[in-house]
Each structure stands twice: as structure tokens, then as C-alpha cells.
Image (tube, rainbow, N blue to C red):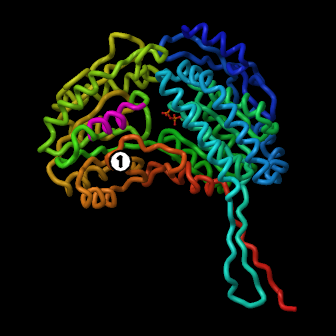
Amino acid sequence: MDAKSIVCKLQSSGLLRSQAFIGGKWTDAYDGKTVKVFNPATGDLITEVPCMGTKETNDAISSAYDAFRAWSKLTAAERSRILRKWYDLLMAHKEDLAQLITLEQGKPLKDSTGEVAYGASYIEYYAEEGKRAYGDIIPAPLPDRRLFILKQPVGVVGAITPWNFPLAMITRKVGPALACGCTIVVKPSEFTPLAALAAAELSVRAGIPPGVLNVIMGDAPAIGEALLASTQVRQITFTGSTAVGKKLMAGSAPTVKKVSLELGGNAPCIVFDDADVDVAVKGALAAKFRNTGQTCVCANRIFVQEGIYEKFADAFTKGVQKLKIGEGFGEGVVLGPLINDAALHKVETFVEDAISKGAKVLLGGKRHSLGRTFYEPSVIANVTGEMSLAREEIFGPVAALLPFKTEEEVIQRANDTNAGLAAYVFTENMQRSWRVTEALEYGIVGVNEGLVNTEVAPFGGVKQSGLGREGSKYGMEEYMEMKYVCLGNLSA
Ligand code: ADP
């Protein structure tokens, strides 16, 4: 099926929505303005969505605030049953949702299908975990007292998400928030709002009450400011660039909101002489090229120890050569286009900078003949710490190889960044794997493994990569406050 017939099919299934979702109603921008949503692989217009701002955001916040009263009073089991139904519907529409993600984001259909399962898993997990939002009883320091901790939902949450995982970045936030009784206003990226809107449509079919989940989009700074200014919004959760994350953190200060941030990474992938080369190549390929290099946990700096450098570079380059690039609906395609011209330009500039400073192109190093925003899967060797490729997030299909000599040196270089999200280590030496893992200043470490994402583990970074964790039992803590209750005067 071609992209155009897929759009028609999705329109008739009701999953391709072109309006925002406020208080249970499909809504246009109040002034009628729209934003165009394009297929990055073809440049074709998919649809237009409302370009909203302050007024619509304030209405979405009010709806969420009003809905909070009833939603937070449901039992955990009641919320769980509704969320479970939502999960079942997301999975029942896996194919439609995957097609929508490929249309708006460009990733290969197989990856989009994986994202739907991964995204939905957060709803399933938190449908279960909501029932385990346990409090605590503390042994009292005086005989006539009893001390308790109650866990309660924070209230209205404002969630801002990026374009690289149009569904999963949303469910990671909405799942735990709704499970513990919060209500939420979600602002997906304007590049990829369609999966979020389809998920909202399925939330209606699942019985999530009006106002509990709101989805708005348009003027990002105006929406952000309205969320920040509101005293009714008690929590801001954001996934995106470090620069915007810092703005949101600063903007949360006047109303002292809770803040959860998943920001940029600069992941080191360290391959020691004692690594199993096949395992390291497979792991590094997965860690580098997932989503065409457009994830915050992508291996940004592949450090390879001198003794294995040539062998690894050769096997890795052969592996990259086999990666088929193209439109996401194409047969056997594993890499898609970059999201837009700005992303393409950034990758190009980084590679030019590296070449001008002495790096060597082993593969690719230029735009792809497919045109548009396609960039050749590339391997750049002899990268140094002075090059943009090593200093900043590449967010594209370009692997940077950096030789190193000793364990001590590579730990120092790996930590020499303000980012601290994911790191990868390849070694067959158990003692070394522990030493290096403990020394790395990162929130996530993959040892002999390049794919670390799962809903059951805490995802998040240290240093300027963020605050808080998503997924696992720890992920729900972000959306709850603890209330200490002291019961006194118990003596008869
Ligand atoms: P990326 O580089 O991954 O696009 P951004 O941080 O620019 O990262 O975008 C992530 C999300 O933040 C998107 O939904 C975007 O619209 C939103 N965003 C961008 N600027 C602002 C802002 N000033 N206030 C609130 N949200 C913003």
C-alpha cells in the first residue's frame, strides 16, 4: 500500500485526527490557524492540525483541573481497568498506529510497530503498578502516636514531548500520571502530533473520562509559558533538548512546580581490547543506528581500544554497509530520513568540521542520492574530542570512532561532558565491566548490550541530561506527593 492510500484508510478508521483534544472534545484553534504536518520521507502534506496558544492551553488546563476531582477519587483498580482497556485498544490498532508513525516521523514500519508495542507497554505496566502505590507506616517515637505516609497524585501535569518517538514518549508520561490519579495536558511535537491524537481517540473508546487526557499543539513557547504560569499545573514533565529543558526548569520556579526532565545525551560506547568483536559490533550498530541515530541514548562517541581498533572498524563498517536506507514503507528498510532540513544541515556541518580537523571517512560522509533529508549511513574514524561529532549530539546516521589507549584514559574522556544519560561498555572481563560501570557518570549503562530500553527499568540521566526517571516502579514516584500524617492523643 502506498502512503496516500494509507492516509485514506487511517482517515476512515477515525485514527487520523486533525483537531486537538480538550475536555473530551475535538477542537480547532480558536482563531482557526493551523500547522502543516508533512511526511519527511516524501515531503507530502499529510494533514493540518490546530496551531494553538495561550487561550486553548488555559482551557485544557481547566478541563484537566476539573477532571482531577473525580479521576483521583476512583480506586486504583477502577483506573487500572480503564488503562488496561486503552492498552488493549493500542495493541489492537498496532498496524494503524505504526503506519501513522512511519508517515509523520519517517522511521521504518518495523521500528514503528516496535514503538507501538513499546509505547503501549507503559500503559499496561502502569495499569498494574497503580495498584501498588503503597504508602508507609513509621514506628512512632511516642506511645500515643501513629505515623503514616500517604502517596497522593500531584494534580494536573503538563507534558511536552519530542518527535523522535511520537507515541512512546507520550505513553511513558501519561501511563504513570493517569495510573496514580493525575490528569494531564500533553503537547506533542508539531512535527509529529498524529500518533498522540490517535492515542487520544483510543482513550475515548477505552472510557478515559473527558478532561483526564488533553492533547494540544501549535505555538510551543506560548503553550509552554501558559503551562508554566498556571498555579493549577503542579508538575512539568519534558523530553527534548537540553536548552528547552533548562528554560522549563527556570520557568517552573515562580510557581514551584515539580519538574521531570529527559534531555540530551552524548553516549559513550566503549569497546575494550578484550571485547567479543561480534557482540561489540552488533551492540554498537544497534546503539548507534536505532531510529536513524535520532535518539538521546544513541552511541554518540564510539571509543575503541588501540589493539582492536582496526579489526572493529573494519567489521563495524561492513555492518553499516548492509543497513538499507529508504522510505519507511519500503521492503527491508532499516534506516529512514532525518526529521527535517535543520537536522540534515547539522549532521552535514558536523561531518565537514570533523574532516577539516583530520578525521577519516570510512563510509558515507555525504547526503544520500535519495535526496530530501536522507543522509548516507556513515562511519568517521579518528575522531577527537575537539570535533563537534564528539562534543554534541549527532542525531543522525553517522558513527564517530575514537581510538583510546587505557581504561583510565577512556573513563576520563567518557565522563568529560555535561551529558549523562546512557553509556555502553563492551568487554569480556567481568572485573573491568564492574569497575568501568561504577566509574561512568551516566544514568543508564549497557554492558555488552546496545538496546537497553524497557518499561520495567528506570530511564533517565544525571548531570545535564535530566531529572527524574521514567518507567519502572520509580517512574510513578514522579507523579506523586507524599503526605505525612501524624495521629496523636491515642491513649485511652
Ligand atoms: P528537539 O530538538 O528534539 O526538537 P526541542 O526541545 O526543540 O527538541 O523540542 C521538544 C519539544 O519541546 C517539542 O514538543 C517542542 O515543540 C517543544 N518546545 C520547543 N521550544 C519550546 C518552548 N520554548 N517552550 C515549550 N516547549 C517547547
Magenta highlight range = 280-290
Pointer 1 local density, CA inside 10 Å: few below 14, some 14–19, many at least 20: many
Ligand 1 rendered quadrant:
top right
Membership of 287 in magenta stretch: yes
Residue on which disc 1 sits: 423
Residue 93 shows in this picture? yes
Q: Chief secondary structure of the magenta span? A: helix
Tell which of 189 and 218 is nearer to you: 189
Residue 151: x and y in percent read 70, 63
Q: Quadrant of the C terminus?
A: bottom right
Helix, strand or loop under label 1 = strand
Which residue sits at x=41%, y=43%?
A: 265
Callout 1 amino acid: Ala
Which residue sits at x=58%, y=52%?
A: 475
Q: Quadrant of residue 185?
A: top right
Tell which of 4 and 164 is nearer to you: 4
